[in-house]
Amino acid sequence: MNEPAEPGGEPIEARLRRALGARSIVLVGLMGAGKSTVGRRLAQRLGLIFKDADHEIEAAAGLTIPDIFAIYGEPSFRDGEERVIARLLRAGPLVLATGGGAFMRDTTRARVAESGVSVWLKAELDVLMRRVRKRGNRPLLETEDPEATMRALMEARHPVYAEADVEVVSRDVSHDRVVDDVLEALVAHLDPSAPPAVAAQ
């Protein structure tokens, strides 16, 4: 059995796992911020399970999210989303990517604060629009002017996302670079007195 590394040379992943304990990492932010892609890689680095709330909602409903919106409306979708996120958080620790509107609910924010650490992946408008145009199935952007809709979402949601424990800019660099930024921000938040961490290669 290997001896543990000295604190200064401890891999950042090991330090973060220890600091997290039983808590989950919950990624919040607008569509196109990279929550699912970054979340999947983050979970892999930490040896945690990754869950995408939108995928879990679709599995539970047996419908796609656009279909849920079309058939039942957004309020019904949000109720289901809240229940699914509560269930996932009870199963932690894990890395959870949430839908753009999930963190807007007071009850969901309270559950996240109780069971996890929230990370806001914040991206500029042009970055978000470039990413969301690559994929369909964005019910909230089915409008005459998707960019104006996204701008309105930013204005409404950014003040609430700002309540997250940690903020990381999701910019146009490699996903692994953003994952490194998330790891460093989380360690600084959870373990601020420790010496600088060493990222694993």
Image: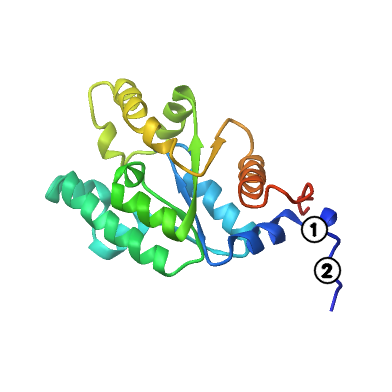
Mark 2 element type: loop
* Residue drawn at 57 percent across, 64 percent down: 48
* Residue 1 position within the rendered picture, expressed as x and y whole percent measured from the top left: 84, 79
* Residue 65 position within the rendered picture, expressed as x and y whole percent measured from the top left: 26, 50
As rendered, which of 26 and 190 lies closer to the eye? 190
Indicate the quadrant where residue 133 lies. Answer: top left
Looking at the image, do the residues carrying marks 2 and 1 touch, with CB atoms under 8 Å apart?
Answer: yes
Three-letter amino acid code of the residue under disc 2: Pro
Indicate the quadrant where residue 144 lies. Answer: top left
- Can you see residue 148? yes
- For label 1, the crowd category at 10 Å Cα-Cα, with few meaning under 14, some 14 to 19 and many 20 or more, is some
Residue 115 numbered tag: none
Upstream in the sequence, badge 2 or badge 1? 2
Residue 10 numbered tag: 1
Q: Is residue 88 above or below residue 182?
A: below
As rendered, which of 190 and 124 lies closer to the eye? 190
Indicate the quadrant where residue 90 lies. Answer: bottom left
Taking the view exactly as shown, the residue that stands out farthest to the front is 193
Three-letter amino acid code of the residue under disc 1: Glu
* Residue drawn at 49 percent across, 30 percent down: 123
Instruction: Name the residue beneath numbered marker 2.
Output: 4
Left or right: where 108 falls relative to 22: left
